[in-house]
Image (cartoon, rainbow, N blue to C red):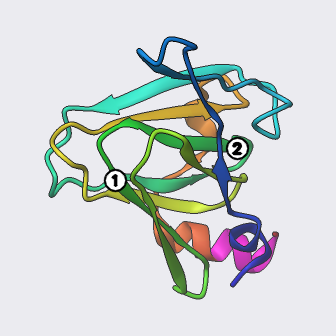
């Protein structure tokens, strides 16, 4: 696999249960629990289980994805068409995706809420949305 995809890794966050046992909460801090300062947070929810989201790479943005409800899968694909699939099935399990990783999110459960943390503000110009373009960029420059 390519260097970018090799840097993908699973993250385990710590749940904290209230002293009276009523509830758990999860605390995620930038530069501590994730390897970047968090500049943007968004959610993907209400997705049909057959829908594939993502299908792009980002030149600058790094991401951490975690399902705060339900479950989903994340496929990362390199320029040689080799891939790995990761399942996000508990609220305290996340995946770190560095820049220039082709990502596809799919197999969303009905109750899935996928929270996405990123180190960059939204900039449409940094998105690579065509896989053939991604392959060429990776083979030429990265």
Q: What residue do we see at 40% from left, 27% from top? A: 43
Spatial separation of the CA atoms under disc 2 and disc 1: 19 Å
Q: Is residue 2 above or below residue 45?
A: below
Q: Which mark is residue 131?
A: none
Residue range (magenta) = 136-141
The residue singled out by tag 2 in the image is 62
Looking at the picture, how far across and down is residue 52, in whole percent? 28, 56
Q: Of discs 2 and 1, which sits in the foreground?
A: 1
Query: Which of the 4 image quadrants contains residue 27?
Result: top right
Q: What residue do we see at 21% from left, 48% from top? A: 109
The residue singled out by tag 1 in the image is 72
Q: Which callout, 2 or 1, points at the residue further toward the start of the chain?
A: 2
Q: What residue do we see at 84% from left, 31% from top? A: 32
Which residue lies most toward the right here?
Answer: 31
Q: Is residue 120 above or below residue 142?
A: above
Q: Is residue 108 left or right of residue 38?
A: left
Which residue lies most toward the front here?
Answer: 20
Q: Residues within 10 Å of mark 2 (few under 14, many from 20)?
A: many
Contact flag, marks 2 and 1 (Cβ < 8 Å) = no
Q: Is residue 52 magenta?
A: no
Query: Which of the 4 image quadrants contains residue 4?
Result: bottom right
């Amino acid at each position: 696999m390519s260097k970018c995809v090799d840097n993908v890794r699973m993250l385990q966050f710590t749940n904290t249960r209230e002293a009276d046992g009523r509830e758990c909460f999860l605390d995620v801090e930038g530069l501590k629990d994730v390897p970047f300062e968090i500049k943007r947070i968004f959610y993907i929810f209400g997705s049909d289980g057959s829908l594939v989201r993502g299908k792009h790479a980002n030149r600058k943005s790094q991401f951490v994805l975690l399902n705060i409800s339900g479950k989903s899968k994340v496929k990362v694909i390199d320029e040689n068409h080799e891939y790995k699939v990761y399942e996000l099935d508990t609220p305290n399990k996340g995946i770190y995706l560095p820049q220039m990783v082709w990502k596809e999110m799919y197999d969303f459960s009905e109750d899935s809420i996928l929270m996405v943390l990123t180190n960059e503000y939204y900039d449409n110009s940094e998105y690579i949305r065509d896989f053939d373009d991604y392959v060429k960029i990776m083979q030429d420059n990265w």
